Image (cartoon, rainbow, N blue to C red):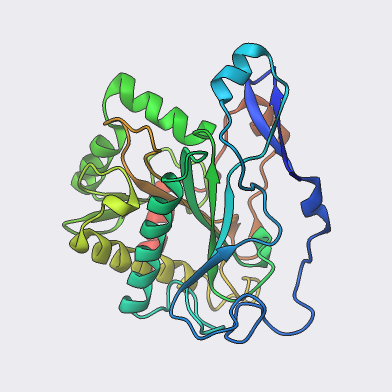
Amino acid sequence: MNGEFRFDGLTRRWVNIVGHRQGRPNLPTTGCPFCVGGLEAPDPYTVRWFANRWPALEPGAPIDIDAAERAGTASLPAIGATEVILYSPDHDASMSTLPPEQLRAVVDLWADRTTELLARPEIEYVLVFENRGPDVGATIHHPHGQIYAYPFVPPEPAAEAAVNRQHGCASCVETVDEIAAGERVLCASATWAAYVPYASTHSFGVRLTPTRHVGRIADLDDAERDGLVELLTDVLGRYDRLWADDPARSAMFPYLLWFHQAPKSAGEEWHLHAHIAPPQRAPGVQRFVASGELGSGTLSNPVVPEAAAALLREH
């Protein structure tokens, strides 16, 4: 086992120490490994998944995080799974440019992998995500995302679920309120809504939420999966068109995207949704997080959410 969960007694959070990933290659040296015939895709495919060669989490026997904390255990093996999801054999495509049927195949693969991973005894939570563009550290241009499967519920989705348990579903309330107000909405349908959150922590950050209270990607029905396809195409296309004529803008608009969904041991407090967090606040201008923000736990967003929504709607 290469990775190691270490317990931080100050925050009571587990940190994944993955020293072996320090030596992973930054860029392919001979061709694209994700194109058909490449290292990770030797045969033709529509969509494809495979285990990451440089995993942050690896298969193993189930571990009891709660028992480890009670016992004062400081270190555990980094059990789980790390997978790569290829969206298309087209090297120059992106999620925003995929035909609807191709993007629907991606959504279905996300759902299938979520179900299969949660069936494993050592897995409790599945995080579907994408790092797009070199500005956020993506090392291969080919359209792809990743899945991390954890033996526990990570702190961020756990905190959201705790709020819902105490106060009722915040996603249900927020989605209804945002659609009714309209000021921060980018697009909405019978099944999904996309909006810049009222208290967005990220410049040009967007939240995608199904209008039905549903826990996982795998729980979405056909209409909801098609609605997600339409929403992703719309919102990500707006990002691609934002500042497109500005020479200071990155050739590939960068963003971080992740889905929060219900874990294996799920109650009614879980409402599936996605976060999109671009790292830029203006063309060619990085939105850096300062020590005052990290030190206080209170982020400062320099772009007013209503202004960000208005600009994205224009594109």
Identify whether 62 is placed above or below 36. Answer: above
**Along the viewing direction, whichever of 75 and 128 lies nearer the viewer:** 75
- Seen at 68% across and 14% down, the residue is 72
**Along the viewing direction, whichever of 54 and 215 lies nearer the viewer:** 54
Q: Is residue 288 left or right of residue 48?
A: right
| Residue 104 placement: quadrant | bottom left
**Along the viewing direction, whichever of 45 and 278 lies nearer the viewer:** 45
Q: Is residue 87 at least partly visible in the picture?
A: yes
- Seen at 79% across and 79% down, the residue is 29
| Residue 228 placement: quadrant | bottom left
Quarter containing the C terminus: bottom left
- Seen at 36% across and 71% down, the residue is 105
Q: Position of residue 295 (x, y in %)?
A: 69, 27
Q: Is residue 183 at least partly visible in the picture?
A: no
Identify whether 212 is placed above or below 33. Answer: above
Q: Position of residue 188 (x, y in %)?
A: 23, 58
Q: Is residue 295 left or right of residue 302?
A: right
Q: Position of residue 88 (x, y in %)?
A: 48, 78
Quarter containing the N terminus: top right
Q: Position of residue 272 (x, y in %)?
A: 33, 45
- Seen at 83% across and 58% down, the residue is 23
How many marks the image carries: the answer is 0
